[in-house]
Amino acid sequence: MEKKRTEAPSTSARSRDRGRATRRRLIEATARLCEERPGAEVSVAEIAKAAGAFPNQVTYYFGSKDSLLVHAAFLGLLHDARRIERIGRQAPDAATFRRNIARAVLAMPSLPPVARALAAGISKPELAPVVDRHLQLLFRQSERYVSRLIDSRGWRARRPLDVEARTFWSTALGAVLLVRAGAHGTVADLDLAGALTIHDESDPGWGLSGGSGPDGPQPSRSGRGAMTDGRGTVGQ
């Protein structure tokens, strides 16, 4: 009896590990196929073959191909975001950081697939929770990155960092959605750098009241919305 009790959990754990590995292979294979054939339709059979899985495992693990495409689109975006972080760390000052980050993000190949995922979340309510989970992960990852960066550089932001991250990505993704919807112009017409408020001593207004300088209220570097007026923490 004791042997049977110990074998059952071990079998269950192995099954869960296999399931997680299959999910990961399906997502990675889908992301790879979508990157290789941007804008082209990718079939379930092609995805399964590339992942070394069975076609019915797409619906078993994700419910639908559309759900899998959402997962794959955001995987590509998170990978691109990590590459963008390296570009940001190389910036010598805040103005260069804002400019380089904006330019690199608008050139990311993963933006159009994510825009399609957002559109799918609107047209198919069952996908909205999947889209939301991935967006929250993107926002948190970006907030942590910016928090570490400005702490190490002595830079500041004029608003809480969670708002900074949401505003930046909402602007970038919104621009792609507008272009896809047929709006006149391209994403290159967007001043995405203007959606960032990260600045340093070389920026105008560093020490002006009402901004983020030592003479005026300053958003907390933690990004939690605390404000300091030099006498203590207020506005929490």
Image (cartoon, rainbow, N blue to C red):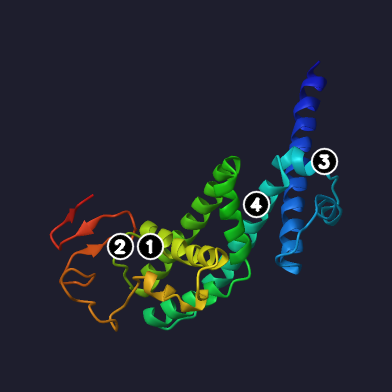
Image coordinates of residue 15 in percent, x first then y, are 78, 36
- CA gap between label 3 and label 1 equals 41 Å
Q: Residue at x 48, y 63 (%)?
A: 174
Q: CA distance from mark 1 to mark 2?
A: 6 Å
Q: Say which element carries label 2.
A: loop
Q: N-terminal of the two: label 3 or label 1?
A: 3
Mark 2 residue type: Arg
Dot 3 amino acid type:
Asn
Q: Residue at x 53, y 66 (%)?
A: 176
Q: Residues within 10 Å of mark 1 (few under 14, many from 20)?
A: many
Pick whichever, 196 or 184, lies toward us: 184
State the image coordinates of residue 228 (x, y, percent, origin top left).
19, 60
Position of the N terminus, as image quadrant, is top right
Label 4, label 2: how far apart the Cα atoms are: 30 Å
The tag earlier along the polypeptide, 1 or 2, is 2
**Residue topped by disc 2:** 159
Find the residue positioned furthest to the left: 231
Res 203 visible: yes
> What residue does disc 3 label?
56
